[in-house]
Image: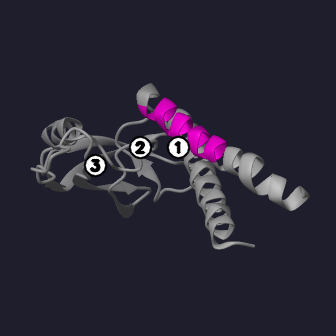
Amino acid sequence: MTVGLVFLAIMVVIFSITGFVLVIGTLVGVTRGVRSKSWPTADGTIVACRAPEENKGENDDAAVYHPTIRYEYTLDGKPYSSETIDFVWWGHYFFWDAKRLVSKYPIHSHVKVYCNPRKAQQSVLEPGFEWPYAVGGLLFGLLFLAGGTALFCLVILPVLVS
């Protein structure tokens, strides 16, 4: 095997694993989001809220940000704490969306927390999911899977068969 073929084989693995993780992660997030709409609620309080720093680089529009919004709630007499805002986008947002979330959940404000009835420590502030994030995660995942499959079929498979 040549160095170039080994490199391509590694790329196939990387593309395929990345695509698989994106697709499965998005589907799990969508499933949790759908289920969370029917979860019981508890009263909660925002205990920490930090806005992301604005990126002054060349690609501000493409950068993603992670706002920190921590809340506490009590369920069946037990205290819990979480930072889960929603289930689909893994906590990364465009700058304007991150700023919107931080202004929506100011520190010490009272919030409704949706709690998983099977796992009380699993909770979310915004039940459901947003279609653009779900479709984006699936599309990117499928693109990575297609890229890995194409590399395998067009470059590696012919070498293995010959």
Which residue occupies 13% across, 39% down? 103
Give the residue at mark 1.
29
Mark 2: few, some, or many residues within 10 Å (few <14, many ≥20)? some
Q: Which one is earlier in the sequence, the residue at label 2 or at label 1?
A: 1
Q: Residue furthest right?
A: 161
Magenta part of the chain: 133-147
Give the residue at mark 2.
89
Q: Which one is earlier in the sequence, the residue at label 1 or at label 3?
A: 1
Which residue occupies 61% across, 67% down? 7
Q: Is residue 66 left or right of residue 27?
A: left
Work out whether 155 lies above or below 89. Answer: below
Q: Which is more toward the observer, 83 or 141?
A: 141
Instruction: Assess whether residue 158 is covered by the magenta stretch.
Output: no
Give the residue at mark 3.
44
Instruction: Assess whether residue 143 is covered by the magenta stretch.
Output: yes
Which residue occupies 14% across, 55% down? 50
Residue 56: x and y in percent read 9, 50
Is residue 150 visible in the rendered image? The answer is yes
| Amino acid type of the residue that numbered disc 2 sits on in the rendered structure | Trp
Per the picture, the main secondary structure of the magenta-coloured stretch is helix
- Whole-Å distance between the Cαs marked 1 and 3? 22 Å
Looking at the rendered image, the quarter that the C terminus falls into is bottom right
Q: Which is more toward the observer, 19 or 110?
A: 19
Is residue 38 visible in the rendered image? The answer is no
| Amino acid type of the residue that numbered disc 3 sits on in the rendered structure | Gly
Q: Residue furthest top?
A: 131
**Secondary structure beneath label 1:** helix
